[in-house]
């Protein structure tokens, strides 16, 4: 067979492969197997490199038409797609408006990426299976760093809108939007905002809260985010001295189970008060106490706070028992104003279910660090809880050996579950000589 004949055969087989036109009878499969044997024989007898490559391509398509995967039930094929997507480094659809800062805008074409597209490009059978499963198209990530040329972005935005349509009207969505430009969020965010009633998980990183307000300008409604369970809102620029702008998502009071915020003020904490909330991570908390925060979220299981500012608590003697909290983490940084619990807000608090405690003092003053651990120790002892994991992070120029020993003494905790900088306590203790802390006039602030 001549090279043009092989080229024609290749074109014919390629069309069959794309449309999954496989032999559907025993006779047809036997005929194809005979053709495969003949093609293999031609490949062995051919010495011309160009013709050999053409024969190899034909053989690959012939063997592909008999591949067992082409006869799988659609349900099994969907399961395979699902496994590939979940284990991929890019499990969703990513829209990138500019790849890197040093790439000129004029040289960059916005694009969509994601492993789901590989399935749609293989053959019509795979394409039909992938498009017909809405959850494959319901995880979308937008990376927006600068406005691309409108003529180049319109086509990609239209393609993204088609992908959103493929996700149906009821499949829960997972949304990530990273926009570090000034002013309004990217135009594609408007398409995602229109699907807010389907959001189940959202990660939003904007320059400021004002960008989020622009994205959701209308009056808050309890029906806007009825499925939202996991929310992370972070902003590059915040100024607590300015009257805070209401968060348009939290104002709708979605049924959150997990929440991460850059900043939370007590005056706004009642917005997140819910029996659904189980995980709360706050960059900076400002209020009278953590106790009041725990009281508003009685089912909270994990609390992480980076820094905090406490005021005097007029109800410091109120007994509070939070019986759901399992994990409490403080750090890595603290405010310079009131970085401890010295306003008495925790002296009547008990956490009987607490099992995990992490404290990261970063560059905290030594006296404040020791006072903080002392107060936390009193809470643990009063709660009569059994700690299963304790991690004290050490940063700075002074030792923590003596402080850590004092903290762990008399606590119901397994030494094998205690760590300093993620190093097991006994190992860390053996590798660090006891260095007594000496207080003098020069070091009085440490």
Image (spheres, helix red, strand yellow):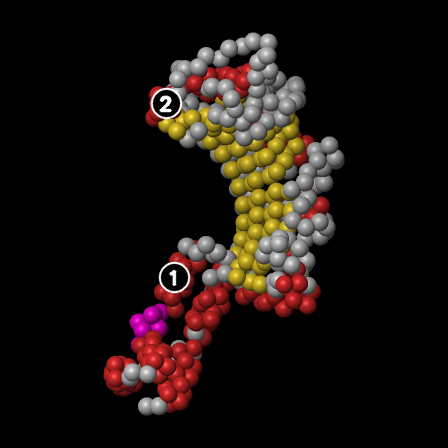
Asked if marks 1 and 2 touch (Cβ < 8 Å), the reply is no
Within the magenta stretch, is there residue 70? yes
As rendered, which of 194 and 108 lies closer to the eye?
108
Q: Which SS class for mark 2?
A: loop
Rendering quarter of residue 291: top right
In this view, 42 is above or below 246: below
Rendering quarter of residue 61: bottom left
As rendered, which of 73 and 51 lies closer to the eye?
51
Q: Quadrant of the C terminus?
A: top right
- Relative placement, left or right, of 420 versus 49 is right
Q: Which SS class for mark 1?
A: helix
x, y (%) of residue 339? 60, 22
x, y (%) of residue 72? 34, 70
- 10 Å neighbourhood of mark 2: few (<14), some, or many (≥20)? few
In this view, 148 is above or below 203: below
Which residue in the structure is indicated by mark 2? 431
In this view, 244 is above or below 413: below
Count of number-bearing discs? 2
Rendering quarter of residue 310: top right
Q: CA distance from mark 1 to mark 2?
A: 50 Å
Q: Quadrant of the N terminus?
A: bottom left
Residue at image coords 65%, 42%: 236
Q: Residue furthest top?
A: 440
* Numbered label attached to residue 181: none
In this view, 108 is above or below 327: below
Q: Over which residues does the magenta segment extend?
A: 65-73
x, y (%) of residue 438? 51, 10
Which residue in the structure is indicated by mark 1? 79
Residue at image coords 66%, 60%: 105
């Amino acid at each position: 067979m001549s090279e043009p004949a092989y080229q024609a055969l290749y074109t014919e087989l390629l069309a069959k492969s794309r449309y999954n036109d496989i032999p559907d009878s025993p006779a047809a499969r036997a005929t194809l197997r005979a053709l495969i044997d003949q093609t293999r024989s031609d490949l062995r007898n051919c010495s011309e490199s160009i013709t050999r490559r053409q024969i190899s391509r034909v053989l690959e398509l012939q063997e592909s038409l008999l591949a067992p995967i082409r006869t799988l039930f659609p349900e099994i094929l969907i399961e395979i797609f699902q496994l590939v997507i979940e284990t991929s480094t890019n499990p969703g659809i990513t829209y990138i408006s500019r790849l890197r800062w040093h790439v000129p805008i004029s040289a960059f074409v916005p694009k969509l990426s994601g492993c789901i597209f590989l399935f749609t490009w293989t053959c019509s059978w795979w394409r039909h299976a992938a498009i017909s499963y809405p959850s494959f198209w319901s995880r979308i990530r937008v990376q927006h760093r600068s406005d691309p040329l409108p003529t180049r972005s319109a086509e990609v935005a239209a393609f993204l809108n088609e992908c959103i349509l493929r996700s149906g009207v009821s499949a829960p969505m997972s949304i990530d939007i990273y926009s570090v430009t000034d002013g309004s969020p990217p135009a594609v965010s408007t398409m995602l905002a229109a699907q807010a009633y389907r959001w189940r998980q959202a990660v939003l990183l904007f320059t400021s809260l004002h960008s989020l307000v622009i994205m959701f300008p209308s009056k808050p409604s309890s029906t806007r985010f009825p499925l939202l369970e996991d929310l992370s809102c972070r902003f590059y620029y915040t100024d607590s001295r300015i009257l805070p702008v209401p968060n348009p998502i939290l104002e709708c009071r979605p049924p959150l189970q997990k929440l991460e915020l850059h900043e939370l003020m007590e005056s706004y904490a009642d917005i997140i008060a819910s029996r659904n909330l189980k995980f709360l991570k706050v960059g900076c908390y400002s209020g009278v106490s953590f106790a009041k925060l725990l009281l508003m979220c009685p089912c909270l299981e994990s609390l992480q706070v980076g820094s905090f500012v406490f005021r005097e608590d007029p109800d410091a003697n109120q007994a509070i028992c939070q019986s759901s909290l399992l994990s409490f983490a403080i750090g890595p940084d603290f405010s310079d104003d009131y970085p401890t619990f010295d306003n008495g807000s925790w002296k009547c608090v008990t956490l009987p279910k607490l099992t995990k405690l992490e404290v990261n003092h970063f560059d905290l003053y030594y006296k404040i660090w020791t006072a903080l651990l002392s107060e936390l120790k009193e809470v643990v002892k009063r709660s009569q809880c059994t700690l299963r994991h304790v991690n004290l992070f050490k940063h700075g120029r002074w030792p923590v050996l003596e402080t850590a020993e004092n903290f762990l003494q008399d606590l119901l905790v397994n030494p094998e579950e205690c760590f300093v900088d993620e190093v097991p306590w006994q190992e860390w203790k053996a590798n660090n000589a006891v260095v007594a802390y000496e207080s003098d006039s020069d070091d009085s602030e440490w």
